[in-house]
Amino acid sequence: MSAAQLATAAGPKARVAGGYTALLIVSLLAPLVFPAYVTQFAFLWVLVVIALCWNVMGGEMGYNSFGNIVFFGVGMYATSVVQVGLYGDVGAYTAAKGGLALDLTVTQYFVGLGVGMFAGALLAVALAGILGLGMLGLRGHYFAIGTLGLGIAAAELAAGWDWIGAGSGMVPPNYPDAAGIDRTTVFYYLAFILAVATFFTLKRLRRGRFGLAINAIRDDEDKAEAMGLHTTRYKTVAWCVSAFFTAFAGGIVGNIVGFIDPRTVAFAGVTYGVWMVLMTVLGGKGTLWGPVVGAAVFHVTQELFWTYLLGWQRVALGLLIVLIVVFFPKGIVGYIRDKWPEKFGYTVDESATGAAADPAQQGGTR
Amino acid sequence: MSPLLEVNNVSKAFGGVQANHDISLQVADGEIAGIIGPNGSGKTTLFNSIVGAHPIDRGSIKFRDEELSRLRVPHIARRGLLRTFQQTRIYKQMTCVENMLISRPHANETLGSMLADFDEADYREAGELLELVGLYAKRNLQAGELSFGQQKLLEFAMALMNNPKMLLLDEPTAGINPTLINGLLERLVYANRELGITLLVIEHNMRVIMSLAQRIYCLAHGQLLAEGAPETVRNDPRVIDAYLGGQ
Ligand SMILES: Nc1ncnc2c1ncn2[C@@H]1O[C@H](COP(=O)(O)OP(=O)(O)O)[C@@H](O)[C@H]1O
Ligand SMILES: [Mg+2]
């Protein structure tokens, strides 16, 4: 019995590789073929990332977190603060309310951006660790309710903190004209790289001890404890992983939007905060591809609604959500998985020997 | 030599219900001991007390000479004292293999080991134990799809995967098709003899416990009624009374 034999059948390797290659080519070429939509595409990857991250908590672990928006906002602010702080005085910069432009060289700009995003991600991880140790002792619903206030509290704190611009927000440094490549294209590729890194990191983590531990916590946390799992540790690490990539997404969005408002851009609970949940539920909680599919379907529908149903787009979106929850409670990928379980590797191994002597062979259900 | 598990004068009440009253028992290393008693006599409560699922009111519980009564469930489990549940508990949305893999021992967990992949040895052991309980062919099915009896077998295999020193089994044959019971018994004996796991088994089925256990404790109304060799306990008039009275 080797690992390969035991592991869930992955399907023909060549076809999988082909699929990934096709996706890669489409994604790399998209900005060149549809230059008018580059910003939209960049947002798609950002949405994929925050949905994937939310799925770690709400889907894979069964802990509905309404606090992930905090990491998004923290990543956004921290990135810009570092971008400015490396080359100027943050307090003076924000006090000028955009009147004090930093003229950064190309190198300065990208160093600041890179350092800023990593600093933001580490800050978010630290915050998730601290909040997690305090809140992840709570079970399921209590945790969800406890996280409800986090985004609002963070928004109010940011809106009252003069150093980062308080209620008037903060403007990330200007993109250097000398860069020779269009700003939106740069952020498209950054968002794409982030999405790929997030996807494959989570794909790897979910089949290892981490992934199975958080699934076990979702299925029966009492059992997991009775089996000796360090449940609080796993839960906290899960939130940290989720926070890490969410913060990068925030750093990118702050720079794409070009203006960080504490309530409507950074700690935007009613938009990004709700969307990350919706996209995951739409695509299928607890599946690998669900958040990706959910983000794509959500983003496209939302754009179509904006274009064709102007004025009614929020009503249409609300109706869509109701329809999905009623008719596809397990989401798109969850529905497909229930319909064709064998495609997902849920199969009986007819070739296994010794079946006749097995006590379990009698009275099976399928 | 001191016993592996030593329960001394343990009491536990839920509101007005005295579920365990002044219970003492010892299980020696390598032994198979049994607990019998009518429904509601406090058997499951005693297991819960031992594994730290709730604080006890009085008494002491020692495992390998270490006091357990202030430790919490996962800490006790990681010391090699594991229990299975009367209402079988497995991870329903995970496959059988996944249920097995995540049941590997969790002592000495570091951030590195938490984020690590399973290795070849983990897969091999999972496969072998699934083979032992006859679930190998179904290893890639979601555990929730299994029949009740199969779920019990899976839970038992998961416990073995955890490599415990001692296993507390709460009615392992309840709800299992009678034709499967002998197979399960063989596996319990195998775990004891070949894997060196000490067993303490709550059992309703008299035939089963008589053939399995070397010593038996009988509880009634939260109190220890009798203890001794299976034959002695079965013929004890107080035990016969408790069972007949309980019917
Ligand atoms: N968590 C609990 N809360 C209140 N009463 C309980 C609880 N657990 C058990 N009891 C009561 O304790 C008594 C013993 O129950 P239990 O230990 O489950 O018996 P057994 O396993 O021998 O059938 C019963 O009267 C039961 O109702
Ligand atoms: Mg019981």
Image (cartoon, rainbow, N blue to C red):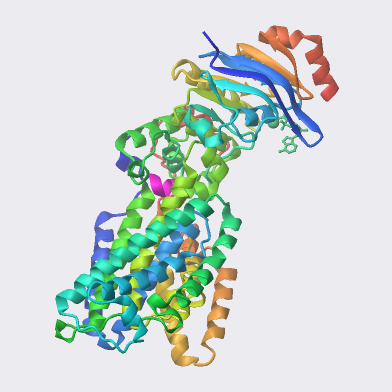
| Residue at 45% over, 78% down | A262
Picture residue at 49% right of the left edge, 68% below the top: A277
In this view, the residue in front, B149 or B119, is: B119
Please give left or right for residue A48 compared with residue A58 in the image.
left
Q: Horizontally, is B242 left or right of B103 in the view?
A: right
Dominant secondary structure, magenta: helix
- The span picked out in magenta is A209-213
* B59 up-or-down from B233: above or below: below
Q: Residue furthest right?
A: B245
| Residue A99: image location, x then y, percent | 31, 89
In this rendered view, identify the residue nearer to me: A35 or A265.
Answer: A265
Above or below A213: residue B31: above
- Counting the numbered discs, the total is 0
Taking the magenta stretch, the answer to whether it contains residue A205 is: no
Query: In the rendered view of the protein, which quadrant contains the N terminus of chain A?
Result: top left
The residue shown at (30%, 42%) is A4
Image coordinates of residue B55 in percent, x first then y, are 65, 33
In the rendered view, tell whether residue B216 sits above or below residue A310.
above
Going 30% across and 58% down the picture, which residue do you hit? A200
